[in-house]
Amino acid sequence: MSQASIGIIGGSGLYAMPGFEAERRVVLDTPWGAPSDDYVLGKLGGKEVAFLARHGRGHRISPSELNYRANIYGFKSLGVERILSLSAVGSLKEEHRPLDFVIPDQFFDRTRGRVSTFFGDGLVAHIGFAHPICPQMSKVAHEACTAAGVNATLGGTYLCMEGPAFSTLAESNLYRSWGMDVIGMTNLQEAKLAREAEICYVTIAMVTDYDCWHPGHDAVTVAQIIDYLNQNAANACKVVEAAVRSMPAERSCKCGSALKHALITDPKMVPDTTRKKLDLLVGKYLR
């Protein structure tokens, strides 16, 4: 039985979600180990919601160390069909100013060796990922930004880098020459795994500062960045509540059937251990 229909992933600076009613914590284990933290379940905007602090309370887990599979699988096991993912980012374009939000519709991968699939071990699947963000969720998120009074851009490309160090100046200038909009360290893997889990997914990228290409970058202090993180977190809470409140009851996208034509392996050849491990995701297609 579903315990939540909407998932929220809180990024840097956002470790809790104010406004929850009947809040309770749920500790989950998954076939891929433990998620980043407990899931916090409650009502927000009249809907059942599950919140997860991506880096754990106290920001203990670096982007390269995150157990992305466990985090997304945990949401799936709670019955979540949609995920709003908040992410602190640097801006690669002058027009995306600190405290602005961007709702990207594309990703570019600059990570190295991160696991970003549930599949393998005898079961092969190739999901479509040309359009990695749910279009229905993007529209809802952008309208929620407007309702919350937050300046936001609909569309753009999120470059996902490895980290934990930030870009060199040469890298930052190269990414700008490619036309990238914002840069972060976490959301690509989440988007791929959410698609494999047939969960609608949208990134709400919160601009903290300009990346190092900007002439004023070196003048930005740690205190300013923390201040921007806090302001972004406050704005994010308003945006998330508005998005949850206005979320349509029915999904009009194709995210919920992403695996329908993606499974390549002959069902008779899938090992029992893999079949059991992935039953939550593929059971309906293998029966």
Image: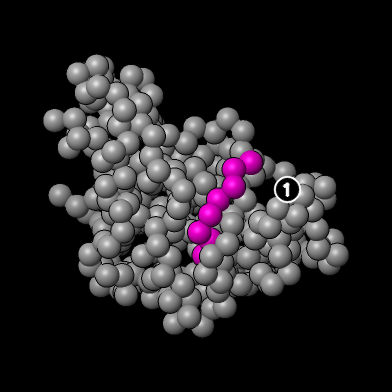
Residue at the (71%, 65%) spot, across then down: 93
Helix, strand or loop at label 1? It is: loop
Q: Is 140 situated above or below 87?
A: below
Q: Is residue 259 left or right of residue 62?
A: left
Residue at the (58%, 30%) spot, across then down: 113
- Residue receiving disc 1: 166
Q: Is 127 situated above or below 169?
A: above
Looking at the rendering, which quadrant does residue 24 occupy? bottom left
Q: Position of residue 206 (x, y in %)?
A: 58, 65
Question: Magenta segment range?
Answer: 103-110
Looking at the rendering, which quadrant does residue 100 occupy? bottom right
Q: Position of residue 246 (x, y in %)?
A: 32, 75
Q: Is residue 39 left or right of residue 158?
A: left
Verify whether residue 37 appears in magenta: no
Q: Position of residue 10 (x, y in %)?
A: 47, 57
Q: Is residue 284 left or right of residue 30?
A: left
Query: Badge 1: few (under 14), some or many (20 or more) residues near its Cα, within 10 Å?
Result: some
